[in-house]
Amino acid sequence: MGVPVIVDCDPGTDDVAALVLAHALAQRGDLDVAAVTTVAGNVDVEQATRNALDVVGLLGWDVPVARGAAKPLVADLVTAAEIHGTDGLLGVELPTSSRVADGRPAWQVMRDVAASSDQPIDVVATGPLTNVAVALATYPELGERLRRVVVMGGAFLAGNTTPAAEFNVYVYPEAAQRVFTSGVPFWLCPLDVTHEAYITADELGQARALGSPGAVLFADVIGRYLPLVARYSGGRGAALHDPLAVVYAADDSLCTSAECFVGVETRGSITRGMTVTDRYSDTKLERNGHLVETVDRAAFVARVLDLLAVG
């Protein structure tokens, strides 16, 4: 089916929506999802893992789910209950799956999937980068086995957790900086582009009308989330932050990107967690990553609706 992919997430409403799309992409043969790993972020890691297990159970998806880091290694955990609820689902009820988490920690699963693959693998990270950073530190050889990391994170115009910082990077800036300076190729989908990847209430109605379990779950969780986040898109709809990263991993033709320097501020008193790029300055810092800059919203939403028809 192609390059094995690990989806590293912190479900979370839009992570749940991203998992629905990852399953559809796997069913279509567009992504070879080898594992789902969880990390503390939107909710604590136990709740994130429970949500991931229940989502894959609802979808009938035979993919391992592995629990990852419970907190940043150098700071207290910050969660986003005000956006996602303490359950991560804003009260949307999922049938409790009988599935249990893989016995290995997330970073070992990353290493094992990479070691067993005959080609370098991809990681799509839609939560804090704690697991990826731990994996790279624990298994130095892993860097050579990662083809790329597609990251939902960062912001360059304005943050959503502080004026300077986007949530995923703010939770553990040191982990993001570790990944961005690791030499592993990465593509960053920041708020600046994900806010343009929004879905309207009418389009959510179209999703729900498809009737499949995945489509209904997608419409339920994003529908609950829409009133809380519509202000970020000027009232137009709900930004599909994590779904964009997952779809981009399968089809980068929906977006434009540029190679540039990307760094993270880890010390500033009001800028901790800020992502900084060097696209146009005279300094011309060494390019270390790729910044996703634009999205064709109409084509993206059409792709999302097409995938939700899968089930």
Image: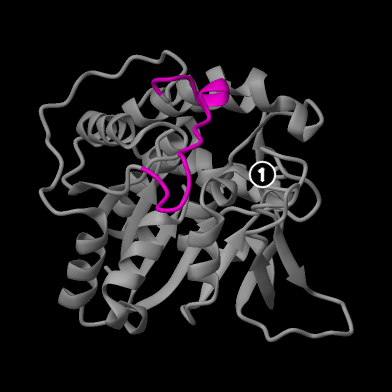
Q: Position of residue 296 (x, y in %)?
A: 70, 53
Quadrant where the C terminus is found in the figure: top left
Query: What amino acid does circle 1 point to?
Result: Ala
Q: Position of residue 134 (x, y in %)?
A: 34, 63
Front position in the image: 53 or 24: 53
In the picture provided, is 163 more to the left or to the right than 203? right
Front position in the image: 78 or 117: 78
- Residue 70 drawn in magenta: no
Vertical arrangement, residue 18 with respect to residue 224, above or below: below
- Residue 83 drawn in magenta: yes
Residue drawn 47% across the image and 62% down it: 249
Residue 39, by quadrant, is top left
In the picture provided, is 100 more to the left or to the right than 176? left
Residue 196, by quadrant, is top right
Range shown magenta: 71-87
Vertical arrangement, residue 140 with respect to residue 17, above or below: below
Residue drawn 24% across the image and 37% down it: 56
State the colouring used for the structure image. one colour
Residue corresponding to mark 1: 197
Residue at the right extreme of this rendering: 282
* Mark 1 residue crowding within 10 angstroms, few (<14) / some (14–19) / many (20+): many
